[in-house]
Amino acid sequence: RRWLLIPALCAAVILAVVLIVELNKQPQVLPDNSNTTPVSHDQPTTPDPEPEPDPEPIPELLTLVNPWNQVPEDWSVDLVTLPNGLEIDKRCYDALMDMIDGCYDAGLTPVICSAYRTQDFQQTLHDNKVSEWMEQGYSREEAREKAGHQVAVPGTSEHQLGLSADLTGKEANEWLAEHCWEYGFILRYPEGKKDITGIINEPWHFRYVGTRVSLDMKDTGLCLEEYLGAV
């Protein structure tokens, strides 16, 4: 009966071999995905554009007043009295006095005939000019239109800023037109700019803007509206 033991022994040997092989196998280690960056399927986003900076405010000395731009409601004037009793803004007093002295040194006799004006005084001047045109046969509407090119409508006069002066005198205007830039003034209403300024040529009207701007405008042929890009 020994032959019956042979299959049993073979089976036992095979089983032992299989167990030994299985015990010697290395355990399978799965990859660690904890530190991997997940893949995003979202569309890439475009960053919001940076807001454009606000434009630089216009300095007070360059405040634009004309038939289309009234004197700012919050405008204030620090007035000082000129030798002839008229008043002007303190910011341009010294420059105006220096310009007058320079004109006198050149042998001329400039006269300050107008400077700061109140709303009421500007109204009186404008009404008088309207009356002059009506006396020549123009209707009130026509007279107002013509007067507005010569005497600014109240609220739209540079004189109400306190930064302007009208100067007259024999040959003085030519000297002032040539040298006003040196003192921070500009000839405000030059020839050929009526359609832009709204006012006829006034060779006697000078506006203070400060020397940095006045020298920058010198010889450019630009009026203040053009210089400020307001046309």
Image (tube, rainbow, N blue to C red):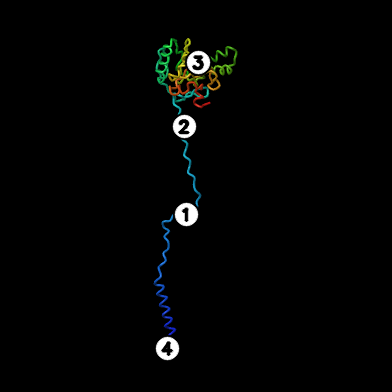
Kind of residue sitting beneath label 2: Pro
Residue shown at 56% from the left, 21% from the top? 195
Q: Which mark is residue 71?
A: none
Disc with the residue nearer the chain's start (2 vs 4): 4
Tell me the crowding category of disc 1: few under 14, some 14 to 19, or many 20 or more residues within 10 angstroms, Cα based: few
| Separation of marks 2 and 3 at Cα, in angstroms | 33 Å
| Separation of marks 4 and 3 at Cα, in angstroms | 144 Å
Q: Which mark is residue 203?
A: 3
Kind of residue sitting beneath label 3: Pro
Front one among 67 and 155: 67
Residue shown at 51% from the left, 49% from the top? 43
- Check disc 2 and report the residue beneath it: 55
Disc with the residue nearer the chain's start (4 vs 3): 4
Label 3 element class: strand
| Vertical comparison of 121 with 229: above or below | above
Residue shown at 47% from the left, 32% from the top? 55
- Check disc 4 and report the residue beneath it: 2
